[in-house]
Image (cartoon, rainbow, N blue to C red):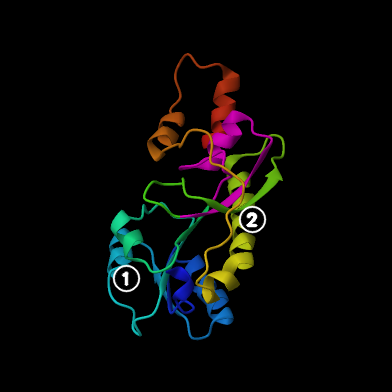
Amino acid sequence: MLASLPMPEEIILLTGDVEGPHFRVILESHNPALVVVHVQTRDELEAACLRPTTGGGARRLISFSTLVIVPAAVLEALDLPAYNFHPGSPEYPGSHAASFAIYDGAGRFGATAHLMEEKVDCGPIVAVEWFDVAPDSRFMDLELQTYETLLKMFADLAAHLATSDEPLAVLDAQWSGPKHTRAEFKAMKELQADMEEDEIRLRYRAFG
């Protein structure tokens, strides 16, 4: 059972090349003995997660703002709960959440951390932070604000993730809304000859 395991020996960190070294420092500051393995691709993830840990201890996966879909076999091989930091509020699961929020005229938006399951953006939610969306925001503005919120959320949860084998407490918050895809995002960037000018301006602001 999870409660019988020691503190994590290893964390697999699935994120970009900018975030990886910074997050490693944060996690190791809370647990100097922790081994942090930074991966960016599915192949690197599978290789890291499916091999034994050096000391045979517990392993955790943290995914932060990545497009890589984690296979079920990887999640099943982990000793500890895996968490994903999603750049969007629970109303916007899936890809390019900020763009679809602007297109919908959302009045508030935010960032979400959740337990990872086989299906994308559907696991129990452990942290959410919302903020108001400024009028006439462009997708780049909203993505930047969301990213900054997500960084703060990671910093707030890092101590627990680096030192505790206990699951994070689940919030009374639920995923809702359609799970948008990269294909949908690409389709929304295509303009049609019969579109109204207001629609064209909105799509440019939301999708570029």
- Between disc 2 and disc 1, whose residue precedes? 1
Q: x, y (%) of residue 174?
A: 56, 42
SS of the residue under disc 1:
helix
Q: Residues within 10 Å of mark 1 (few under 14, many from 20)?
A: some
User: What residue is drawn where x is 56% and y is 22%?
Assistant: 199
Q: Residues within 10 Å of mark 2 (few under 14, many from 20)?
A: many
SS of the residue under disc 2:
helix
Foreground pick, 103 / 91? 91
Q: x, y (%) of residue 42?
A: 31, 59
User: What residue is drawn where x is 53% and y is 73%?
Assistant: 164
The mark found on residue 48 in the picture is 1
Residue wearing tag 2: 149
User: What residue is drawn where x is 55% and y is 32%?
Assistant: 204
Q: x, y (%) of residue 53?
A: 34, 79
Q: Quadrant of residue 126?
A: bottom right
User: What residue is drawn where x is 38% and y is 63%?
Assistant: 40
Say whether residue 99 is left or right of residue 94. right
Q: Quadrant of residue 159?
A: bottom right
The mark found on residue 87 in the picture is none
Examine the rendering and report whether any part of residue 5 can be seen.
yes
* Separation (CA) of disc 2 from disc 1: 28 Å
Amino acid at the residue labelled 1: Ala
Give the number of the mark in front: 2 or 1.
Answer: 1
Amino acid at the residue labelled 2: Thr
Q: Is residue 49 magenta?
A: no
Tag 2–tag 1 contact (CB < 8 Å):
no
Q: x, y (%) of residue 197?
A: 58, 19
Highlighted magenta segment, given as a residue range? 87-115
